[in-house]
Amino acid sequence: MKENQNLDDMEIVFQKTEALTELNFHYCPGCGHGVAHRLLMEVVEEMGITEDTIGVAPVGCSVFAYQYMNIDMQEAAHGRATAVATGIKRVLPDKYVFTYQGDGDLAAIGTAETIHTVNRGENILIMFINNAIYGMTGGQMAPTTLEGMVTSTCPYGRDVKHVGSPLKMSDLVAQLGGACYVTRHIVHTPNGVRKLKKAIKNAFEYQKQKLGTSLIEVVTNCPSGWKLTPRETIDFIEEKMLPIYPLGDLKVPTNISKN
Amino acid sequence: MKENMEKEIRLMKGNEALAEAAIRAGMDAYFGYPITPQSEILEYLEEQSPKRNCVVLQTESELASINMIYGAAGAGARVMTSSSSPGISLMQEGISYIAAAELPCLLVNVVRGGPGLGTIQPSQGDYFQAVKGGGHGDYRLIVLAPATVQEMVDFVFEGFRLAEKYRNPALILADGALGQMMEKVELPAEGSLPKVVPAWATTGKTKDRERNVITTLHIQPEEMEAMNLRLEKKYAEMQCEVRYEEINTSDAEIILVAFGLSARISQKACDLAREKGIKAGIIRPMTLFPYPSNILAELAEKIDAFLVVEMNAGQMVEDVRLAVNGKVPVHFKGRKGGMIPTPEEILVEIEKIVIPKQVLQD
C-alpha cells in the first residue's frame, strides 16, 4: 500500500465547473440530464460568459435546472420556454440566452412557440433533450416516442395509426429561415460528449454573431421511464433511437464571421 | 433615432391614445397579437416603434405574448400586452404565472361581448375574470377601469406605477367603445414616470450579487403556503389604492354603481332622474381591485337603494351586495351581448325603484 500522499502535491485533472451549484442532481442513476447540464455550463464558464448568460428552465424532469445552473435563470410554464427566452432576449439583446427543454415541452405542448421562435430567428440556443418519454410524470408517451415503444399511456406500444409517428422536431425546424444551426448529439459515449460540447460552443459563438436560432438535440435515455437498466438504455439508444434520430448536423450557418 | 415627446393635447382614438401613453410612460417592450376591437394598439406601436426606442413584436398567439411578457418583465423591463376577451382568456395561464412570480407588467383588455367567440361589440362581461382571478390558484390583479379616453391614458401611467410598486400585474379593463371612440386627451411628457432596473431581475449574475431566479415552483407545501400568505398580505396592503368617483351622493336616495362606459351612461340617467325630482347619485369605481367596498357600506346607512348598471348579466353587482351586506336593496340593470344600455332605459329602472316625489305630492 502506498503511503499517504500530500494532497497539495496532487494535480487536479478534473473538477466540477463553478457554473454549476453545489447541489446534488436529483436525476435518476444513468440519466443523461446530468451530463447535458454539465457540458452546457462548462462551455458557459470556459467562454467566460457566466455574467452575461440567462437560462430558461422548462417543465419536466429538468424543471429544477435553475437550482443547478449557477447563473440568472427563469422557470417557464410548460412549453413556453422559447417565448420566455424571446422576451428576455428582445430586451437584453447583448446577453446570451438559452432554453433547456424536453421533448414533451418543446415538441408537444410548446410546438407553436418552438416553430415561431426559430422562424423569427431569435438569437438564442435551444437545448432539446429527447428521451422519447415523459419522465417527470411517470413515463407517458411523448411526441418523440418510437413506433411500437411501450409507455404507460401506450401500453400496447405506440400505434402510429392512432397517435401519429415520432415527431422529428429538429428536421422540422431545420427547414425554417430563422434556423442558424440545428444538430443532433448524444451524451452516452466519450466521443459523443466531446462533439456535443463543441456544438454548444459553436451555438454560443453564432449567438454572439447574431446569426439566428441554434437548436441542439440530445438523444438520450430514461432508465426509469423505459424500465431498463442504464446499460440497456444505451443499447436501446444505439439500436432503436439513432436510426430514427440520426446524429449529425441538420443545418449549419453559411455566413460565419472568422473573428 | 429617439424622439422625446413633450406634454400635448390631441384628439385621439382610445386604443391609439393608450398606445401613445404606453410609450410616453417608458414602456420598454410590447408583445401582442391582433384581435378586434383593439388591434389599433399593436398597429400604432408597430408604426411608432422604430423612432421611439421601444421593442414591439407581433407574436404567433396571445399565449406567446404573455410568456414573452413574463420573460421580459423578469429581465427587468417595463412591459405591456393588450388583447380582447378571447385573447385574454388564452393568456390566463401566463397571467397566473406572472402573478405568482410577482412580476410587474401592464395588461389591457378591451372587452367584447362573450362567451365564446361572441361579438366584437363592447361589453363588461370579463369583470369576474379580471377581478376574481381568471387563471388558476390564489392571486389578484390590480384592476383599473377607465371611463374616458383621458383615463385610457392616465391609467397606463397609474398601471405601470402600481404594478412596479407592488410587483404585481395590473390590468386595464376597458371595452370596445372606449377603444374605438375619439376624445380630446392630454398626453403627459415622455420620461415622467421614473424607472429603475429592479435588483431581482435576471440581467446576468454579476460577482457582486447572488444569482437571480424567477420561478413559481414551490414543491414543499409549507413553502407554498408561506408564499400564499405573503401574496395575501400584499393584496391587503393594496387596499390603500382604492379609487372611485362620487357624484351627487350627499343628498341621494338612490345610488347607481357603475364602472367604465356604464358609468358615463348612468350619469346621464341620473341627470334625467333629478329632472324628475328623484335624488339619484353615482359611485363609479375606478379601481375594481382593490374594490371601494367601504364607501358603499357607508352609503348603505344613508340611502334607500342601490342600482348596479353593467354591460353584462350581473357580475360587479355581487361585490356591491357583499359591501352593502343586506342593509338596503341592491337592484341590477344589465345589457348583454355587446348591447349598450340607454339613459332612458336606466331611468325606467330607477323609477321602478323610487316613487317620484311629484307623484307623492299629487
Image (spheres, helix red, strand yellow):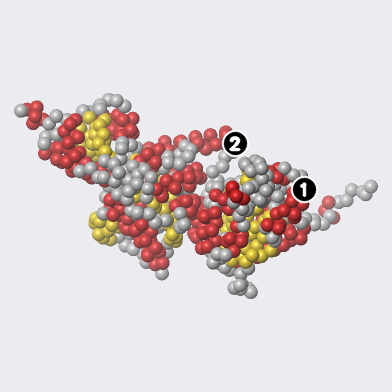
Q: Residue furthest right?
A: A1
Q: Which mark is residue A76?
A: none
Q: Quadrant of the N terminus of chain B?
A: bottom left
**For the residue carrying disc 2, how many other residues have a C-alpha within 10 Å: few (<14), some (14-19), or many (20+)?**
few
* Residue linked to disc 2: B220
* Amino acid residing under circle 2: Gln
Q: Secondary structure at mark 1?
A: helix
User: Mark 2 and mark 1: span between their CA atoms?
Assistant: 34 Å
* Amino acid residing under circle 1: Glu
- Relative placement, left or right, of B230 versus A55 is left
User: Percent x, y for residue B288?
Assistant: 34, 40
Q: Residue furthest left?
A: B362
Residue drawn at point x = 49 percent, y = 59 percent: A91
Q: Are marks 2 and 1 in contact (CB under 8 Å)?
A: no
* Residue linked to disc 1: A232
User: Considering only vertical position in the picture, is B75 above or below B226?
Assistant: below
Q: Image quarter for residue A200? A: bottom right
Name the chain letter of the residue that bears numbered label 2: B
Name the chain letter of the residue that bears numbered label 1: A
**Residue B126 visible:** yes
Residue drawn at point x = 37 percent, y = 54 percent: B35
Residue drawn at point x = 25 percent, y = 31 percent: B331
User: Considering only vertical position in the picture, is B40 above or below B235?
Assistant: below
Q: Residue furthest front?
A: A161
Q: Quadrant of the C terminus of chain B?
A: top left
User: Considering only vertical position in the picture, is A198 above or below A226?
Assistant: below
- Relative placement, left or right, of A135 versus B270 is right
Q: Nearer the viewer, residue A195 or B99?
A: A195
